[in-house]
Amino acid sequence: MEDLELLIDLHLTARRQGPGDAAQTRRAIELAGLSGLRNLKVADIGCGTGASALVLARDLESRIVAVDTLSAFLATLQSRAEQAGLADRITPVNASMDRLPFELESLDAIWSEGAIYNMGFENGVTQWRPYLKRDGILAVSELTWLTASRPTELEDHWRAQYQEVGTASSKLAVLERQGYAPIGYFVLPEQCWLDAYYRPMQQRFPAFLARHGSSDAAKAVVAAEALEIDLYERYRAFVGYGYYIARKFEGGR
């Protein structure tokens, strides 16, 4: 079994595939100035099994196009949307985040929680901008250094995983350079990592290993996730997810 298939199996039943929670999605909605608005067209890119899409659909009472490359995740999202009575507001779309099936200037907002790293922060915000309407909203959470310097062990690990990990100031500069006006930023609280993401994942490890006969490949997946958890528990003061909210800015472009 390929590593990707193992990762899908480990995360398929999870409420979310990365740090976050509904309260932080709602906080981003408020900072974006979308609270109380209705009938928007919003794309949730890299939606996974739908944690943020469900909140957006319920709170905004709007059309959410939920985009992911993994059909298994989209099937779970569809089931959860039906159970929540939100299936009429959410349209799952199997597509790559760097080949989005939208018309230019057709979206009121683009959301992406913990997924933009797949194409790189600068590449993502640059490619997605043309799909936003004038003054459209971009809201993304992104791995972020919380301090100017970090322990070498932590820095080496995350640089190997994601070259674009950087400070909030560097991410905000990217947004400004690529034609956005930043309007909000906050750091995800620790419980978004521990209670909402890591602890449920740890609870799934035994069943995951059992399903795969404790194969070397399955053990390697668990070991990699366990290392990440250990690093976060020891160095959480230095790294987290920054949530960035910005408005498409037309001046000079």
Image (tube, rainbow, N blue to C red):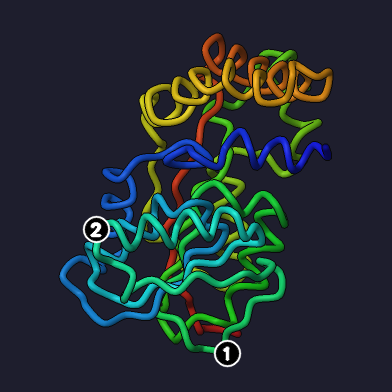
- From what the image shows, is residue 98 above or below residue 218? below
Using residue 176 as the reference point, say whether residue 97 is left or right of it: right
Numbered disc total: 2
Residue 69's x, y, as percent? 66, 61
Residue at horizontal 38 percent and vertical 24 percent from the top: 195
Which callout, 2 or 1, points at the residue further toward the start of the chain?
A: 2
Which quadrant is the C terminus positioned in? Answer: bottom right
Residue 50, numbered label: none
- Contact (CB < 8 A) between labels 2 and 1? no
- From what the image shows, is residue 107 above or below residue 4? below
Judged from this view, the residue extending furthest toward the top is 234
Q: Which residue is mark 1?
A: 104
Q: Amino acid at mark 2?
A: Glu
Q: Amino acid at mark 1?
A: Leu
Which sits in the foreground, 31 or 104? 104
Q: Which residue is mark 2?
A: 30
Residue 67's x, y, as percent? 55, 67
- From what the image shows, is residue 242 above or below residue 100? above
Residue at horizontal 62 percent and vertical 15 percent from the top: 231
Q: Secondary structure at mark 2?
A: helix
Residue at horizontal 39 percent and vertical 30 percent from the top: 196
Which quadrant is the N terminus positioned in? Answer: top right
Give the CA distance from mark 2 to mark 1.
25 Å
Which sits in the foreground, 213 or 222? 213
Residue at horizontal 33 percent and vertical 54 percent from the top: 28
Residue 218's x, y, as percent? 75, 23
Using residue 26 as the reference point, say whether residue 192 is left or right of it: right
Q: Secondary structure at mark 1?
A: loop
Using residue 146 as the reference point, say whether residue 35 is left or right of it: left
